[in-house]
Amino acid sequence: MIQYYLGLVLVSFLVNAVAIVPFIDLLYYLSFTRKKQAPKKGKIPEVDKMHDWKAGTPIGGGILAVALTTIIYLLMVLFSFKNWRNYCIYPFVDEVHILLLTFLGFALLGLYDDWIKIFGKPFKGKIGLKFGISGKTKFILQWTLGFLIGAFLYFNLGLDFIHIPFTSVVISMSWFFIPFAAFIIVSFSNAYNVTDGLDGLSVGLLLIALVSFMIISSSALDAPLTIFLAVWIGSLLAYLYFNIYPARIILGDTGALSFGATLGLIGLLTGKLFALVFIGGLFIIEILSSLIQMTSLKFFNKKVFPIAPLHHTFEKIGWEEPKIVMRAWLVGIVLAIFGLWLALG
């Protein structure tokens, strides 16, 4: 069984590795690349000062990763359904549906945002320019998808509980599980998007999290989820090779919104939300730093951090980008080990 999953990781990696260079060339041809975001007049945001040299880098790594992960996963499910249909926690087909609904639904939202960012007109923000669809519109669409997924989990999969680690206590949430699931999914979607600000940072942390959940799902004999995780991990390994500093391709919102939402869903499906808090701990820390900064500025007109989210603070004080990323990966590994300890305890 473990050999099968590891084989899927390798197959997915090889397929993505072969496809990614021609795909990067295609993105250049289509001018699907990052634009300079600093305004020509007025105050230039600190992030634009630090990162506008990356203008011209192709945006769309998430498009390829989502597309190939979905195709390979569906092929594996079709060919292995008879062998694996009894190795699952939930109804096999329903679990496949909810994974793909989340993965593709948030990817399409992100793709629309990427398209507007690249080919649409920017609009003025409080400081500098804003790109893509408005934050309010994006938030409403995210919550709509979140409630739809929460309802599917509740009505189709019968999921309505939270397990307390190291005990036999299971808290039933009844229908309140629907908004709770939506909150988890939307929160992680945005947390991942906020973290995706340095080359290799978010995908490296995600790989650590997915390997952790692959251990959890395989130990629970959840074949649909473990197959999905194996294929997704292989895809991200190929992408990360080209996303390490200096990146040759950027994930974009297509990947960022989809990957974060799906990570939140995996925590819900495995019933290991307390473990998710640690396994995805740096994503949570990153978005909390942004929320704290915005709240402080709004109510007290003061900054808590030199610049938010947190990884930009380390840049501001002089840390080089690769140094921040490598140390974040190390912290992510330690947190993931603790999360696994909680989940398997």
Image (cartoon, rainbow, N blue to C red):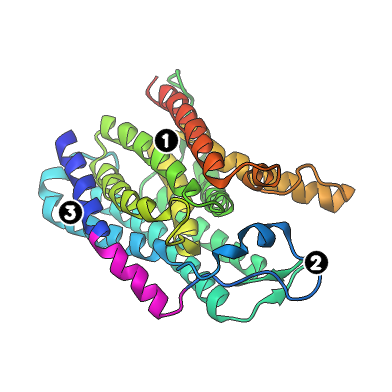
User: Which residue is pictured at 23% across the width and 42% down the height?
Assistant: 223
SS for tag 1? Answer: loop
Residue to which mark 3 is pinned: 76
In the image, is 103 to the left or to the right of 274? left
The residue lying toward the viewer, choosing from 167 and 341, is 341
What secondary structure is found at the residue carrying circle 3? Answer: helix
**Mark before the other along the chain sequence, 1 or 3:** 3
Number of labels in the image equals: 3
Query: Taken as a whole, is the magenta stretch helix, strand or loop?
Result: helix
What residue is pinned by disc 1?
271
User: Would you place residue 162 above or below residue 133 in this image?
Assistant: above
Residue nearest the observer in this picture, 94 or 211: 211
**Mark 2 and 3 residues: CB-CB less than 8 Å, in contact?**
no
Left/right placement of residue 28 relative to residue 229 reads right
Amino acid residing under circle 1:
Gly
Q: Position of residue 162 (x, y in %)?
A: 48, 33
Residue topped by disc 2: 43
Task: Judge depth for marks 1 and 2 and give the one in front.
Answer: 2
Which is in the foreground here, disc 2 or disc 3?
2
Q: Quadrant of the C terminus?
A: top left
Give the residue furthest to the right.
Answer: 300
Task: For mark 2, give the secondary structure.
Answer: loop
Q: Residue at x 76, y 45 (%)?
A: 306
Residues shaded magenta: 18-32
Marks 1/3: CA distance? 25 Å
